[in-house]
Image (tube, rainbow, N blue to C red):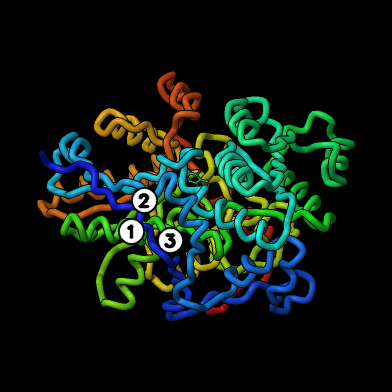
Amino acid sequence: MIKRKILLEDHEIPEKWYNVIADMPNKPLPPLHPGTLEPIGPDSLAPLFPEALIKQEVTTDKWVDIPDEVRHIYSIWRPTPLYRAYGLEKALDTPAKIYYKYEGVSPSGSHKPNTAIPQAYYNKQEGIKRITTETGAGQWGSALSFACQHFGITCEVYMVRLSYRDKPYRKIMMNTWGAEVYPSPSERTQAGRNILAANPDSPGSLGIAISEAVEMAATREDTKYALGSVLNHVKLHQTIIGLEAIKQLEKAGDMPDIVIAPFGGGSNFAGLSFPFIRLNLEEGKNIRCVASEPASCPKLTRGVFRYDFGDTAGMTPLLPMYTLGHDFIPAPIHAGGLRYHGAGVIVSQLLKDGLIEASAHDNLEIFEAGVLFARAEGVIPAPEANHGIATAIAEAKKCKEEGTSKTILFNLCGHGNFDMKAYEDYFAGKIQQHELSQEEINASIARLETPEINA
Ligand SMILES: *Cc1c(COP(=O)(O)O)cnc(C)c1O
């Protein structure tokens, strides 16, 4: 029987995460204080994150040990399977070979526990009793709830009020793992009370929920905050994905020409691609790494590279990144967790230096891709994952047109079993093509008063 599924043994779970900063020809520029515009050091993060994670945020060490306890919990769902997508290849009638790494086998159904577990672990080590966070659709909130429950830490989740109302099952998942979930804006914080005083019916936003979670962590001694994307330590933890994939492809006697992953804040893209970028930088390989973003929120393909705030309210340090402007509001369509205005600093520098590529897909195209995939391969992908599938399909079609056989690897970063509403809308013809005009992008970028980067 031909093998669809390439597996590793538990003892083959990598023992170290890979830090691409060590190999980057140009290191990311420093974060700046928004008032003084001076570079700021890691100390400023101390009220929000435990020391071990702040160290990982700024380390230039190439390899970082994965604690045994973290590997042991990883072994609940890791190593994750790598599949050869025979069904998809057949459906596309392509000479390309297509592989996908499947992260939806984790307890919460996506790649997010890869970082939630070590984040909870390091907080526990430093005596933290409570972790706060925000969640939009609920993927990050559920991953962190699962992780905190493992370490006996209370997880306090601020969930955007609209999602709290419309997506009850992710909330119940969090409750099942023992988390406290509050609709945001809430009465629990000054930030929440201010919003409610002005607008008692506020539907909330990710920006507001972040403000509430950060306020709670900054004002309580036993409480820290956790973020599920964008930051360097999050990307570091996710490299377990690509490190496993390389071992699996070696078993299959193959190496990809193209590596693809969906892109929100960059964590699952970093996770799959950085270990392959190491092969490019260290061994002279020529593997294309492509980040796949929504055409409705195209920071990589149409944004600018400059300093900007990481949040909507302008409370974070200024970060050097590709951005559409921190007050850019994407159209309210089903791009799920990919609706962030900027990209993490490492990925931004890599794109600037031509070491990665980006492509954007329309919302209609990504659901066509997701349904084709579900019918050919079985798993119903998370809407975010459909972006990577759309890029993989486009590359496989190019192979057919050119009569070349390339090897394509993409990250199936999560299943879509809680996202049936989005699929229902697609089948009902309610998902429409959305053109983002250059004027809209220009207007958002023109509002930026943050420093430009002359490079
Ligand atoms: C959160 C999430 C994303 C987007 O975040 P990244 O940091 O870009 O990976 C993509 N897919 C799924 C399934 C997610 O849960």
Q: Earlier in the sequence, mark 2 or mark 3?
A: 2
Q: Amino acid under label 2?
A: Pro
Q: Secondary structure at mark 1?
A: helix
Q: Is mark 1 within 8 Å of ligand 1?
A: no
Q: Residue at x 33, y 43 (%)?
A: 389
Name the residue tied to disc 1: 12
Is label 3 in contact with label 1 (beta carbons under 8 Å)? Answer: no
Q: Which mark identifies residue 239?
A: 3
Q: Which mark is residue 79?
A: 2
Give the quadrant of residue 361. Answer: top left
Residue 328: x, y in percent? 63, 50
Cα separation between marks 2 and 3? 12 Å
Between disc 2 and disc 3, the foreground one is: 2
Vertical side of 226 occupied by 40: above or below: below
Q: For the residue marked with disc 3, what is the amino acid? A: Thr
| Disc 3 secondary structure class | loop
Residue at mark 3 to residue at mark 1: CA–CA distance: 14 Å
- Say whether disc 3 or disc 1 marks the residue closer to the N-terminus: 1
Indicate the secondary structure of the residue bearing disc 2.
loop
Query: Which quadrant is home to the N terminus?
Result: top left
Numbered marks: total: 3
Front one among 306 and 309: 309
Q: Which mark is residue 194?
A: none
Circle 2 residues within 10 Å: few <14, some 14–19, many ≥20: many
Which residue lies most toward the right here? 197
From the viewer's perspective, is 279 left or right of 398? right
Q: Residue at x 68, y 73 (%)?
A: 42
Query: Is disc 2 in contact with disc 1, using a CB cutoff of under 8 Å?
Result: yes
| Mark 1 crowdedness (10 Å alpha carbons): few <14, some 14-19, many ≥20 | few
